[in-house]
């Protein structure tokens, strides 16, 4: 088989964080390549470099046809090389029809009769990939179900007007498709590959990867740790390869707090997509972990708890003060126009108010205290929050939550992109605060952090699929639960 | 020494409201130069009188705009007219009714503000459309209620609104004090901080414990109340309520906010700038009048300045 | 297997036609004499300029902006039309072309500097008003003969306004809803990122839509003086609000690029008729504006209702 594109020592770092390190990879024409890995393994970074959405910090890409094309490799060049991507986020225009969305991708479809051509193009491709799809090319995309939108998006990526398609990258393409339709897609993919196309498939469904790929690459910590023919793997081997061999001790060093059955949990909710009666519960003084692949409903569960949305008859939490530490700092956490101090104080404004006004002295005292306590590295707490490094911004957000009167602290994967030193300091503080009786709900995508938890809920597809405590919290178990179990997969393929 | 000075200089120049005052001063100086020094005092006194009203509605509008992109109150002119008309009729020129009249005027404003936010919430429509639709209703109420009769304000109210102490309008002094209070509210109360937080990032504000809906409601209500206050005082000042008394305050309320250095992207506001901008706007018109330029040129320049200022100040953050 | 329950989208797209029918029936019921060529002509007299202004507003709304200066702009065009266009047609045409370019430039400015369209267009409204006063300081002027003739032309069968509105609605429908570039422009309103990712220029799309808005603004001003024969700088200030209301009545949405040119024209006609309807109802003129506000609120509320039932 001919290589379509070759990656030589491709790396990518965001500041101090090395998202991808020295990846050598050949993508072959006529081969389906599956990529698996846990959160932060570098899958997304790798494919966005291939798609031209990000440029690598070092290394090079070589296309067989045209030689090296670095630097200045951008989305349009990727398209010119015949690379198409289907990302998890929908990139269709909801106010346009299916046919019109196809036209957006193809500037060549214009002039008289363009609509008919766009209609035929997308309909034929839909018929080809998803026979019996039931989508009218004149349907407005916003009116379609998520699954149908995903189908349109996939079919659109396969449509071809002028330049041929050489490589299709599918990131979790089946996440919102049902089993039959997922099979249709995989079958079509096979046909595409058999005709000499290259394909990259990322999925959290290991059976799907094993069944549809010719070759599987396992990634961990920004690098490739295993690269073999798919038939040489099975589910167990994949899970094993994804985990870090060095850390098999799990939670054994720590004795878990026994949950007393008679006391009331402080938090008890049923996630939105939970089919059974399983509930997410937290008792006073516990550190409860929320694990699983990112984007499987953990953040939603936290936000629901915080905004008290999913309160049903059984939820005992009542007017317990809560605080949330955002993970996506820029979107959910930081107030960019404010000083570090004001960013912290907003969580405790009420406690600092004397006769209607926020007391500036108390405010300054609180800032000073927390600057020392949590070691925010800044000469002046009145400096703008954005003058801090990412890790220190995160510390400020921790300070906001810890300085407040909250009894429950919700953490939405707050350690993303934080350096190791800061992490250690924060872990220490969390244990300390839990010892003082505060309750933590901690969504984390990092396996190590689960070691600090008394109890771990693993999420998949918006629901709790495993409920581990104490010694049960091991990387293997979490990985097992995060990736769909074989019984489910059999149901899917049946 | 020089370092300290330059730092001091930087902090002063860094304040966006400085520019509005500088502009106001420049325009005033140009006018006085042209007239050869006559009327310098009167011009300033008149500017203070008229700027007062722009500042009152500007404060309400500023809080609303600070809530972030898309937030704006277009019902201010209608609310002013309505509150002015209702209170003048209630008071029927009797001095004893001055306070009840004020209370009723403010209640009118409160009602409009709450109604505005009710529309925004229940119909899930952008504030601009909600306040626009409600302004139609309110304007009609004002027309129907006022019936075109111009009732004089109570003697005492008229006197209060036009009184001057050593050439400085009494009302301007009161509104400067009010602006100082509003500035403290903005920076040192839970409400003010919440407004600023919502304007920067409303999701982050909600996740930091800010009661976003309540704060937005309060902000729109406040804008209604201030518009009503302005209508009440303006009716007292100008010898009664007229049906188009609010008309010029739609642009004025937005313009003083923008020119005064408040961010149209939300999350950053300042009170002193309102005064600078309001004085600038009035003095500019005075200057152009003094130069003998036509109404056309005046309007044209107003437009150019607003577009120029917003272009220089930049828009939404990316 | 398709369900035959009308979708909420279909219901919504029928809402403008429904409102227009309701108001027409009500008018005919209250005033049977209106059901004649002459009566209809009188009723719909001012519909065309309002329809053009509404279409101009719709163009700006397509790309998620709002134009608060369209009324003043139409007034300026009217003033130019009643003076320069009449006296020296070449100069007049050149000025009007310049106006369209100015609109495109405004769109570019708003996009490039990422400015709130509300503030910019509000500022521009003063600019246009000032220009209009400079061109025509006191009400007066004279519309060119050909414009007056065109606007008072009596078509057979139905009033000319109806033919003209239908024609305009169809042309714009084809330009925005059926052309291939129209899809791209609406896509900019719906999901700008994805349109940009597919290699289209958002700047170009925005400038085109603003230029188109300017073009319809010009048509609105010219058709207006054809009816009034003279102009005044303040002649069309209320068009700003009317045009926004027309787009809403016509089923357009403020964000997301969901527009309907046919609906917008119907909405403009509904608004024109609403004024007559209210006077037939003997509602005092005091409440006329209020009633327009109430109609807006009712239509928006109906829409929320339809959306909610659609979701169930």
Image (cartoon, rainbow, N blue to C red):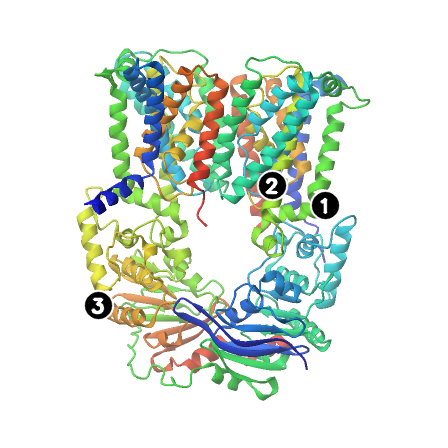
Determine which quarter of the picture holds residue C27: top right
Camera-nearest residue between C238 and A489: C238
**Inter-mark Cα distance, 2 to 1:** 17 Å
What residue is rendered at 59% in x and 53% in y? C196
Q: Which residue is mark 2?
A: C207
Q: How many marks?
A: 3
Secondary structure under badge 3? loop
Whether pointer 3 and pointer 2 mark residues with C-beta atoms closer than 8 Å, the reply is no
Query: Which numbered disc covers residue A436?
Result: 3
Camera-nearest residue between B103 and C257: C257
**Inter-mark Cα distance, 1 to 3:** 67 Å
- Mark 3 is surrounded, within 10 Å at the Cα level, by few (under 14), some (14 to 19) or many (20 or more) other residues, namely few
Q: Chain of mark 2?
A: C
Q: Which residue is mark 1?
A: C179
In this rendering, is residue C89 above or below A183? above
| Viewport quadrant of the N terminus of chain A | bottom right
In this rendering, is residue A246 above or below A368? below
């Amino acid at each position: 088989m001919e290589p379509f594109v070759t990656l030589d020592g491709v790396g990518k770092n965001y500041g101090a964080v090395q998202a991808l390190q020295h990846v050598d990879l050949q993508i072959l024409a006529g081969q389906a390549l599956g990529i698996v890995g846990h959160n932060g393994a570098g899958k997304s970074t790798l494919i966005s470099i291939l798609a031209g959405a990000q440029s690598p910090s070092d290394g090079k890409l070589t296309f067989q046809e045209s030689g090296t094309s670095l630097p200045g490799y951008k989305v349009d060049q990727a398209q010119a090389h015949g690379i198409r991507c289907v990302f998890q986020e929908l990139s269709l225009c909801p106010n346009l029809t299916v046919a019109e969305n196809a036209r957006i991708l193809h500037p060549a479809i214009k002039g008289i009769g363009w609509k008919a051509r766009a209609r035929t193009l997308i309909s034929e491709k839909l018929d080809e990939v998803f026979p019996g799809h039931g989508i009218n090319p004149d349907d407005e995309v916003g009116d379609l179900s998520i699954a149908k939108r995903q189908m349109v998006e996939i079919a659109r990526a396969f449509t071809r007007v002028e330049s041929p398609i050489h490589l299709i990258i599918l990131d979790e393409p089946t996440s919102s498709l049902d089993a039959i339709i997922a099979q249709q897609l995989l079958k079509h993919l096979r046909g595409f590959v058999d005709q000499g196309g290259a394909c990259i498939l990322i999925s959290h469904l290991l059976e799907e990867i094993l069944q549809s790929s010719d070759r599987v690459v396992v990634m961990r910590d920004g690098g490739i740790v295993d690269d073999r023919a798919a038939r040489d793997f099975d589910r167990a081997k994949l899970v094993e390869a994804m985990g870090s061999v060095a850390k098999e001790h799990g939670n054994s060093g720590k004795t878990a707090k026994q949950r007393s059955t008679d006391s009331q949990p402080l938090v008890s909710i049923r996630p939105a997509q939970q089919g059974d009666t399983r509930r997410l519960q937290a008792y006073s003084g516990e550190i409860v972990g929320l694990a699983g692949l990112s984007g499987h409903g953990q953040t939603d569960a936290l936000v629901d708890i915080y905004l008290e949305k999913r309160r049903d008859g059984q939820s005992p939490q009542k007017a317990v003060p809560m605080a949330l530490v955002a993970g996506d700092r820029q979107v959910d956490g930081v107030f960019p126009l404010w000083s570090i101090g004001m960013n912290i104080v907003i969580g405790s404004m009420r406690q600092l108010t004397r006769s209607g006004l926020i007391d500036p002295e108390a405010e300054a005292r609180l800032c000073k205290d927390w600057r020392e306590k949590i070691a925010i590295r800044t000469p002046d707490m009145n400096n703008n929050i954005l003058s801090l490094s990412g890790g220190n911004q995160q510390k400020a957000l921790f300070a906001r939550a810890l300085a407040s009167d909250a009894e429950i602290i919700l953490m939405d994967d707050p350690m993303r992109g934080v350096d190791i030193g800061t992490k250690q300091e924060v872990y220490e503080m969390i244990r300390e605060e839990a010892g003082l009786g505060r309750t933590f709900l901690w969504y984390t995508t990092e396996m190590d952090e689960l070691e600090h938890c008394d109890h771990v809920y693993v999420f998949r597809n918006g629901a709790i699929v495993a409920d581990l405590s104490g010694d049960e919290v091991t990387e293997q178990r979490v990985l097992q639960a995060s990736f769909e179990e074989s019984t489910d997969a059999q149901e899917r393929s049946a | 020494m020089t370092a300290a000075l330059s730092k001091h200089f930087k902090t002063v120049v860094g304040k966006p409201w400085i520019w509005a005052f500088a502009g106001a001063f420049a325009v005033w100086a140009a006018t006085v130069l042209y007239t050869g020094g006559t009327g310098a005092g009167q011009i300033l006194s008149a500017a203070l009188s008229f700027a007062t009203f722009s500042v009152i509605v500007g404060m309400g509008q500023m809080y609303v705009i600070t809530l972030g992109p898309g937030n704006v109150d277009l019902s201010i002119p209608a609310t002013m007219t309505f509150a002015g008309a209702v209170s003048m009729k209630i008071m029927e020129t009797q001095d004893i009714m001055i306070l009840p009249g004020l209370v009723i005027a403010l209640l009118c404003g409160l009602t409009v503000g709450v109604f505005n936010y009710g529309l925004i919430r229940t119909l899930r429509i952008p504030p601009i459309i909600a306040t626009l639709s409600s302004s139609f209703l309110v304007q009609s109420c004002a027309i129907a209620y006022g019936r075109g009769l111009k009732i004089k304000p109570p003697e005492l109210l008229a006197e209060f609104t036009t009184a001057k102490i050593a050439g400085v309008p009494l009302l301007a002094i009161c509104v400067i004090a009010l602006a100082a209070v509003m500035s403290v509210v903005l920076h040192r109360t839970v409400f003010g901080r919440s407004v600023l937080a919502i304007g920067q990032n409303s999701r982050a504000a909600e996740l930091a414990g800010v009661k976003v809906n309540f704060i937005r409601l309060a902000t729109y209500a406040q804008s209604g109340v201030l518009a009503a206050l302005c209508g009440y005082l303006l009716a007292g000042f100008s010898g009664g309520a007229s049906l188009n008394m609010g008309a010029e305050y739609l642009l004025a309320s937005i313009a003083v906010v923008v020119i005064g250095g408040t961010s149209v992207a939300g999350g950053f506001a300042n009170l002193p700038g309102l005064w600078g901008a309001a004085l600038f706007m009035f003095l500019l018109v005075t200057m152009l009048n003094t130069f003998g330029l036509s109404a056309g040129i005046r309007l044209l320049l107003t437009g150019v300045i607003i577009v120029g200022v917003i272009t220089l100040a930049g828009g939404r953050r990316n | 297997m398709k369900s035959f329950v009308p979708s909420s989208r279909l219901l919504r797209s029928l809402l403008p036609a429904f409102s227009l029918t309701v108001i027409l029936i009500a008018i005919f019921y209250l005033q049977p004499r209106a059901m004649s060529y002459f009566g209809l002509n009188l009723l719909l007299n001012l519909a065309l300029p309002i329809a053009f202004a509404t279409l101009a507003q719709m163009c700006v709304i397509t790309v998620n902006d709002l134009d608060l200066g369209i009324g003043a702009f139409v007034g300026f065009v009217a003033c130019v039309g009643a003076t320069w266009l009449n006296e020296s047609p070449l100069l007049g045409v050149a000025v009007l072309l310049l106006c369209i370019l100015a609109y495109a430039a405004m769109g570019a400015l708003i996009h490039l500097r990422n400015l709130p369209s509300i503030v910019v267009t509000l500022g521009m409204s003063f600019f246009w008003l000032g220009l209009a006063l400079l061109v025509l300081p006191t009400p007066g002027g004279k519309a060119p003969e050909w414009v007056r003739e065109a606007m008072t032309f009596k078509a057979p069968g139905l009033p000319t306004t109806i033919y003209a509105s239908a024609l305009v609605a169809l042309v714009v429908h084809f330009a925005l809803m059926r052309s291939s570039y129209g899809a791209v422009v609406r896509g900019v309103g719906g999901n700008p990122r994805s349109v940009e990712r597919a290699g289209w220029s958002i700047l170009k799309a925005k400038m085109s839509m603003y230029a188109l808005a300017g073009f319809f603004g010009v048509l609105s001003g010219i058709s207006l003086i054809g009816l009034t024969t003279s102009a005044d700088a303040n002649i069309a200030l209320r068009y700003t609000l009317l045009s926004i209301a027309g787009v809403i009545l016509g089923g357009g949405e403020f964000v997301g690029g969901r527009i309907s040119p046919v609906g917008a024209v119907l909405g403009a006609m509904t608004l024109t008729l609403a004024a007559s309807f209210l006077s037939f109802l003997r509602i005092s003129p005091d409440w006329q504006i209020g009633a327009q506000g109430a109609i807006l609120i009712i239509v928006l509320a109906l829409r929320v209702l339809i959306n909610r039932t659609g979701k169930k």
